[in-house]
């Protein structure tokens, strides 16, 4: 019952914060509507007495009154539904925004590496749509309890023992609560299997993975793997639902026995002449209502327990990913222009929950206005280093300094707003072109001149000009019949998005051209270099890029070679080639491969 109380109090308080008017209207209308049923039963009993005693006028008046009360019941319930449905939608929106705030509340992305967080998030999103129904359940449960109190009082006027009939529902309620917990536990135990099943569905239905699935002929294996994962979930939930049904049935058998005793008491009183026919009709009517109330209450309790579970899961999400971790609090001021540059001092990093160092005592200087290339074998730690400099992770040890100021002490959101990045796994936003580009600078999303300047800088104007609605053209087919783009075209829009930031303190490319041929990569870097040169002059922004193609790397003023999480070599292309070390070997191997 604790989860029921938790969810009820939470939903009502959330409703009060969200829309007091709708909540008050819903409560009043439901209370009036639910009280109409016992009143109609009382009038029905009086009508029966009047009709049998020949008081025709009273019988007609009471019959009209009964009809009006029933109409009032239907009317109040209908308008209450309109009010609490809207309120439930607002609460669902509020909770969705709360979950989104938790997921994105921290400036970093460490939380996405925590499997507990991913599993909990799946369970939350799976149940979030039940919140609207849970609010309805909370309001209806309150009205049902009010109706039950009035019903018990009326039954006591016929026979004091009959007042205990609503109490006979307590075992059924407790059994229902326990039954729901069994189902919840089964859902928690199978959450990882459900997550796998959903992932496999995404793989099998997403265009990006369809090509490989088809060509490798793994569709049957994928379906079979999904079937096994789903069968595990289904079998566990089916067994839990069966045990739950047995438990609920046992509780309802007890109530049915109490219901039978109540009927027997009334019939016995009628036979002995102690109870009038009107009271018999009244008791039978109210007994039927109590039965309906119990059945309704059991269903409402299940919905409230589900909502309580959602609230518990949201609290768990919040505990795993605090919105403002202590280590992200800031007090320093971000420089308007970079004078010295960015320095890494003995930076080490391991992902949350692991002890393996991805970076090990890395020290590095990135001078203001310079161009630095980062190279190394796969797994050397290049992308991790880039994310650390962007402020997406905090170092496990060591410091990252921006003009001598520790990045931990700077307002990280402001720093990230001054970083212009294009990653290898850049986002393909299947929205309008202006939205795809405009997220690089939200305040300029409706500024066509600014959007076109970014497109010109990325040399993407010809692409957008050929689309049917220009900047307002829809891209992709997920949300409508939009235009499909090639990988290079998506990338050019990603570059335009990056170049919406006209005053960066850091320009960064993290292997965005990995899927392009050498000529296309060279063209991409030419476009980026032209803009980074201007940024370096105006704001002192250095340019840091990661690439595997040494024809591009050699253009950098300074080259850093990473290996096994450490800085192995640094220098210019000529200096590193003269050293005949790791860089020389990597460059020579790639040059030989191109020469064949």
Image (tube, rainbow, N blue to C red):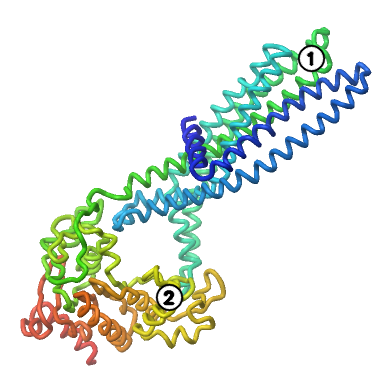
Spot occupied by residue 8 in the image (x, y as percentages of width and height): 51, 35
Spot occupied by residue 115 in the image (x, y as percentages of width and height): 34, 52
Quarter-wise, where is residue 544 in the image?
bottom left
Q: Residues within 10 Å of mark 2 (few under 14, many from 20)?
A: few
Q: Observer-nearest residue: 96 or 292?
A: 96
Does residue 216 appear anywhere in the picture?
no
Quarter of the image with the C terminus is: bottom left
Spot occupied by residue 520 in the image (x, y as percentages of width and height): 33, 86
Q: Which residue in the protein does label 2 denote?
A: 447
Q: Observer-nearest residue: 382 or 242?
A: 382
Question: Position of 262 compared to 526: left or right?
Answer: right
> Which residue shows up at 67% across the image and 12% down it?
161
Does residue 108 appear anywhere in the picture?
yes
Spot occupied by residue 208 in the image (x, y as percentages of width and height): 44, 72
> Which residue shows up at 16% across the image and 83% down it?
587
N-terminal-most mark, 1 or 2:
1
Q: Secondary structure at mark 2?
A: loop
Q: Observer-nearest residue: 29 or 348?
A: 29
- Point out the frontmost of discs 1 and 2: 2
Q: Residue furthest left?
A: 579
Q: Which residue in the protein does label 1 denote?
A: 267
Q: Secondary structure at mark 1?
A: helix
Instruction: Estimate the spatial distance between the alpha carbons at disc 1 and disc 2, rounded to whole Å.
Output: 81 Å
């Amino acid at each position: 019952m604790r989860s029921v109380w938790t969810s009820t109090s939470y939903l009502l308080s959330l409703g009060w914060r969200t829309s007091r008017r709708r909540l008050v209207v819903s409560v009043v209308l439901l209370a009036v509507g639910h009280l109409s049923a016992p009143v109609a039963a009382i009038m029905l009993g009086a009508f029966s007495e009047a009709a049998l005693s020949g008081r025709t006028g009273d019988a007609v008046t009471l019959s009209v009154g009964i009809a009006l009360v029933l109409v009032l019941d239907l009317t109040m319930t209908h308008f209450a539904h309109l009010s609490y449905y809207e309120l439930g939608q607002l609460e669902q929106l509020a909770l969705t925004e709360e979950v989104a705030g938790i997921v994105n509340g921290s400036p970093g992305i460490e939380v996405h590496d925590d499997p507990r967080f991913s599993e909990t998030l799946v369970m939350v999103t799976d149940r979030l749509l039940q919140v609207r129904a849970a609010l309805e359940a909370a309001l209806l449960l309150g009205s049902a309890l009010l109706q039950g109190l009035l019903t018990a009082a009326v039954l006591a006027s016929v026979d004091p023992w009959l007042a205990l009939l609503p109490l006979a529902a307590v075992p059924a309620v407790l059994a229902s609560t326990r039954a729901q917990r069994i189902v919840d536990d089964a859902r928690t135990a199978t959450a990882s299997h459900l997550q796998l099943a959903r992932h496999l569905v995404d793989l099998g239905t997403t265009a990006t993975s369809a090509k490989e699935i088809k060509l490798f002929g793994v569709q049957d294996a994928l379906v079979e793997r999904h079937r096994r994962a789903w069968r595990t979930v289904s079998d566990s939930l089916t067994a839990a639902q069966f045990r739950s049904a047995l438990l609920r049935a046992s509780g309802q058998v007890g109530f049915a026995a109490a219901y039978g005793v109540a009927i027997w008491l009334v019939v016995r009183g009628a036979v002995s002449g102690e109870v009038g026919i009107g009271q018999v009709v009244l008791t039978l009517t109210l007994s039927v209502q109590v039965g309906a109330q119990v059945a309704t209450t059991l269903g409402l309790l299940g919905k409230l327990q589900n909502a309580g579970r959602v609230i518990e899961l949201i609290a768990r999400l919040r505990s795993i990913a605090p919105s403002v971790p202590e280590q992200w609090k800031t007090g320093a001021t971000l420089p308007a222009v970079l004078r010295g540059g960015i320095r890494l001092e003995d930076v080490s990093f391991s992902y949350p929950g692991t002890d393996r160092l991805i970076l090990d005592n890395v020290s590095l200087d990135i001078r203001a206005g310079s161009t630095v290339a980062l190279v190394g074998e796969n797994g050397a730690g290049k992308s991790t280093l880039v994310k650390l400099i962007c402020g997406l992770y905090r170092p496990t040890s060591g410091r990252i300094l921006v003009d001598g100021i520790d990045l931990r002490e700077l307002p990280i959101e402001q720093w990230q707003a001054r970083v212009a990045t294009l990653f290898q796994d850049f986002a393909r936003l299947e929205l309008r072109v202006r939205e795809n580009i405009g997220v690089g600078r939200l305040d300029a999303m409706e500024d066509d001149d600014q959007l076109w300047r970014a497109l010109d800088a990325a040399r993407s104007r010809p692409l957008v000009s050929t689309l049917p609605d220009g900047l307002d053209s829809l891209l992709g087919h997920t949300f409508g019949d939009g235009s499909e783009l090639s990988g290079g075209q998506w990338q050019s829009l990603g570059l335009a998005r990056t170049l919406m930031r006209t005053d960066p303190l850091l320009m960064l490319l993290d292997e965005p051209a990995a899927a392009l041929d050498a000529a296309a990569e060279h063209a991409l870097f030419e476009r980026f270099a032209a803009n980074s040169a201007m940024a370096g002059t105006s704001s002192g922004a250095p340019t840091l890029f990661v690439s595997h193609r040494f024809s591009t790397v050699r253009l950098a003023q300074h080259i850093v070679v990473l290996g096994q999480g450490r800085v192995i070599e640094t220098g210019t292309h000529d200096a590193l080639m003269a050293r005949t070390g790791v860089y020389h070997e990597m460059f020579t191997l790639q040059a030989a491969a191109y020469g064949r």
